[in-house]
Image (cartoon, coloured by chain):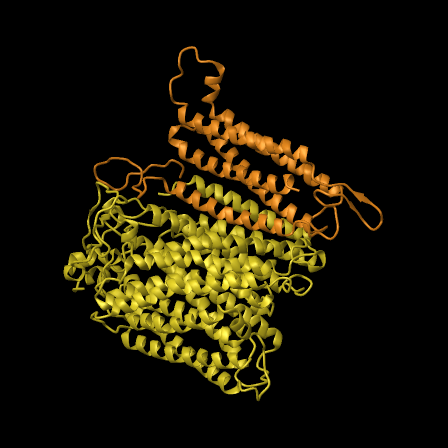
Chain colours: A orange, B yellow
Amino acid sequence: MSAHTTAAGHDDGHVHHHYTTTGLDNRKIAIWAFIGSECMLFASLIATYLIYKGRSIVGPFPHTEYVNEAGQIFKPILDIPVTSASTFVLLMSSLFMVLALQAVQIKHLPLPDGAGWWTRAQRSSQLWLFMTASFGAIFLMFQAYEFTAFVHEGLTVKTNLFGSTFFTLTGFHGAHVTAGVLWLTSLLWIDRTRGLGPQDELIVDIAALYWHFVDVIWIVIFTLVYLIQ
Amino acid sequence: MASIAAPTTAAYASGENENTGIWSWITTVDHKRIGTLYLWTALFFFLVGGFEAVLIRTQLMRPNMGFVSAETYNQLFTMHGTTMVFLAIMPLSAAFFNYLIPLQIGARDVAFPRLNAFSYWVYLLGGIFITLPILFKLAPNGGWFGYAPLTTNRFSPGPNIDFWVLGLQILGISSLAAAFNFITTIINMRAPGMSLMRMPMFTWMSFVVQFLVVLAFPPITIALFFLLMDRFFGTTFYAIAAGADPLLWQHLFWVFGHPEVYILILPAFGLVSEVLPTFSKKPLFGYNVMVYSGIMIGFLGFGVWAHHMFAVGMGAVADSIFSLMTMLIGIPTGVKIFNWIATMWSGEIRFTVPMKFAIALIALFTIGGISGVMHSSPPADLQQTDTYFVVAHFHYVLFGGSIRGIFAGISFYYPKMTGRHLDESLGNWHFWLNFIGMNLTFFPMHFSGLLGMSRRIYTYDAGQGWDLFNMMATWGTYLLVVATAIFVWNFVRSRTRGAIAGNDPWGGATLEWSIPSPPPEYNFAQIPEVTSRYPLWDLKAPEKTAGIDHSHADAMTITDAHAVPVHEETERHTAKELGIPMPYPTVKPLVVAFSMVVMFCGLLFLRNGMFAVAMTITIGGGAAMVAGLYSWLTAPLE
């Protein structure tokens, strides 16, 4: 299906893309509709998190200390420095995604004489796709570490409203990152087997739109859940 | 209108079309066949939902009846609502989206034919998933709105609600996939010259509906996901003891639930907006305003959800705002009513069966609309909420409105879909019995409701002034059974016995009437170039469109060198003869849909603590789904 051009049934033997009203590919429009829908999905999750903020009866709490009836002390559970690092990693992956798309667009152009390593690197879509997917995977490892640490500190999905909303919201986002990593890995695989060129710009562009969207959502989550107390 | 193309239909009927076996239906990606599958499946579920209604009304016929138990009654009213909303009216609309949108915009198929097949299979499997439990008396029993915390484990410990939560989750995926598909189709697949403001009104209203689906389904997906987490994994979203807000579900549900009302009615509005001009021999009155009012209804539809919650005590400010918004939404709806009347005004009206259904929609929807405006006032609503008055209101809107629009659509487009007419006199019997039965069933409910009869009660004592009204309603329902039986007989019989219909049996104005009935698999041998809103009238009856300012060129129009002016196509060829590439039939969408439903089924086993079994089935289904998706996405479309 990807970048598959067909004769549109005209007897002049001229091969071209299907006629579309806007001139854009159908997939490009569908991904925007999909992202619109995803916005409402995350809006519902985030709204619920905000409505339930501060309503948990028992701890651990995100930003404040909690002492239970047995006198056990639970520190504020969110580890902002660590999550700042993972946020940085995810933002960097968006940068790599931009470079990957650029590489697909320009890799066919002849290299100027005496091109340095950076000019060469700019044309390696495999490198940037690998970096994007890897940084996505590193973000997921951070999240796995965070979830495990929270469970050890006594916060599960069952503990309180914070646990339920926090794990569901960030877990939903993590699932989106996982899907994105799978998607990018598939593109990398295609790139390694048959090579992605300018004719494949669209399929990389669509993956990039999704990836940037997932990133933007994380910025919102990071701000509302971690930074604002 | 003239006698055209009968021979081609006969050739079609004689089996010239090679692909008619059951496997061709399972692997089809043709929007017309998928539309037909939607139509048959949704009509089946419509009968199931109707049968549930008959049982409900029989139980309520007299005071203190023991026809069904209270528990069965709960399952019946829950499944009646769920079935009619999600398995009957929405997919009946989807049948028309599928069948008509590509034909009306001059396209050969939808944007993503295989995704379209996927939507249908998910709908079918989801429908079976949510309907089967009633045979084992395990059907969902928490109302179609499934209010949490009532539907949490604590108050609904059985598996009943599990089926409902997972079933709706599955059906939501079907609707969302279809909505992405139709949005793309309408934006991007229009024939040259088919600018947005030249689109037929049905396509326009469908377009608005797809946006409502895309924006309204995520909130209920999340609400259901929370409930699923609460029920299966012990989270606290709806656990009041843990500090949860008892209104969270209601807000999330109605943020979906009210746009859903417009998702149910706008396609019907679109259908009658095709029927009324055709049988009045006049262009639709105020086309632009009809478009804008449809969009306006879509927008305002997102701002009125809390009028379902006036009784929960949100406070005066919230009540006032939602009350005002609700009154406001009556305006664009009223505009539509008056425009339809103005369309008929001084037209040459032909009272065919579709026209009768369309006029009945105007009348009955207006009654339902007026009682709706009554509810918009919180003090009045407090008196009416949860009574049969509300039941009367939304049945006038949905049964009087949506279903009448759909029957108008079925009788109008049946000749296009099958090449044959429905029988006119059986159609008239159906219409009149249905019309009388509908009013006999639901009009008395206004009175029993105002006299205090509560919704969802399985029986009642005599002597409260409700007896006569309930008796009338039940006999009305029996009349509806007779009417529906006539319709089914007519629908099935006319496929082989109906009078042959040509390209354009009604004298229609839009592109779907320019091609043979039933349309060939490629729809248009040559993609038409559109120059006005009523291309066929310009061609065949210019006097109808003379002097109407609808043909001016605009910047939105992109022309294609290969398009030809609108013309009637009477020859029937195969796609191969014409050199038109058609999508390959494929079973992969069904495989992916099936694996996905298996994945959801696995979760059911969590209930009995069978964690290992549940995870095996769920992960197995998920893996099969991903593998199927890879196989699907790497196979060429055509």
Specify the farthest residue to the bottom: B463
Find residue B107 and report its horizontal and vertical position in percent.
30, 49
Find residue B469 and report its horizontal and vertical position in percent.
49, 84
Q: Residue at x 28, y 38 (%)?
A: A7
Find residue A98 and report its horizontal and vertical position in percent.
47, 29
Locate the N terminus of chain A by quadrant: top left
**In front of the other: A10 or B173:** B173
**In front of the other: B572 or B67:** B67
Specify the farthest residue to the right: A70
Find residue B427 and report its horizontal and vertical position in percent.
31, 75
Quarter occupied by residue B601: bottom right
Locate the C terminus of chain A by quadrant: top right
- Label count reads 0
State left or right for residue B181 relative to residue A227: left
Q: Residue at x 70, y 56 (%)?
A: B243
Residue B256: in sight, yes or no?
Answer: yes
Residue A163, compared with residue B45, is above or below; it is above
Q: Residue at x 38, y 77 (%)?
A: B434
**In front of the other: B34 or A175:** A175
Residue B195, compared with residue B340, is above or below; it is above
Residue B573, compared with residue B61, is above or below; it is above
Specify the farthest residue to the top: A114
Residue A195: in sight, yes or no?
Answer: no
State left or right for residue A20 relative to residue A149: left
